[in-house]
Image (cartoon, helix red, strand yellow):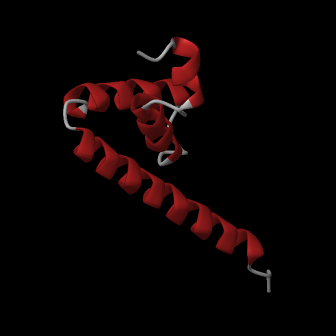
């Protein structure tokens, strides 16, 4: 059975990854609100690991789209 120290070397937990992705996908919400909402959603879906992974991908895609659109606004020269 792995010890706690070995477990930490395996990377972040699915929960931490989910919460991080959820919060990144919502940059305009208050941190406390995002965290609370992420926990509520986690408690609803945590029993289905595949669905959790799908949601993580969905939130990371949303985050990446937000990053691209914000970079386009910054890179556009003003006329």
Horizontal relation, residue 71 to residue 34: left or right: right
Horizontal relation, residue 45 to residue 76: left or right: left
User: Which of 11/19 is in front?
Assistant: 11
Residue occupying image coordinates x 36% and y 29%: 37
User: Which of 11/28 is in front?
Assistant: 11
Q: Could you say where residue 65 lies in the image, as x and y percent from the top left?
A: 51, 65
Horizontal relation, residue 5 to residue 18: left or right: right
User: Which of 72/78 is in front?
Assistant: 72
Q: Could you say where residue 57 lies in the image, as x and y percent from the top left?
A: 39, 54
The residue sitting at the front extreme is 1
The residue sitting at the bottom extreme is 79
Q: Is residue 32 above or below residue 55?
A: above
User: Which of 47/61 is in front?
Assistant: 47
Quadrant that contains the N terminus: top left
Q: Could you say where residue 25 lies in the image, as x and y percent from the top left?
A: 47, 48
Residue 46, quarter of picture? top left
How many circles with numbers are drawn on the protein? 0
Q: Is residue 3 above or below residue 37?
A: above
Q: Is residue 59 above or below residue 19?
A: below
Quadrant that contains the C terminus: bottom right
Q: Could you say where residue 54 lies in the image, as x and y percent from the top left?
A: 30, 52
Residue occupying image coordinates x 52% and y 32%: 12
């Amino acid at each position: 059975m792995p010890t706690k120290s070995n477990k930490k070397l395996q990377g972040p937990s699915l929960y931490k990854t989910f919460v991080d992705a959820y919060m990144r996908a919502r940059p305009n919400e208050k941190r406390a609100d995002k965290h609370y909402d992420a926990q509520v959603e986690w408690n609803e879906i945590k029993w289905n690991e595949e669905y959790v992974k799908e949601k993580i991908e969905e939130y990371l895609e949303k985050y990446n789209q937000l990053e691209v659109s914000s970079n386009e606004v910054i890179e556009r020269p003003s006329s």
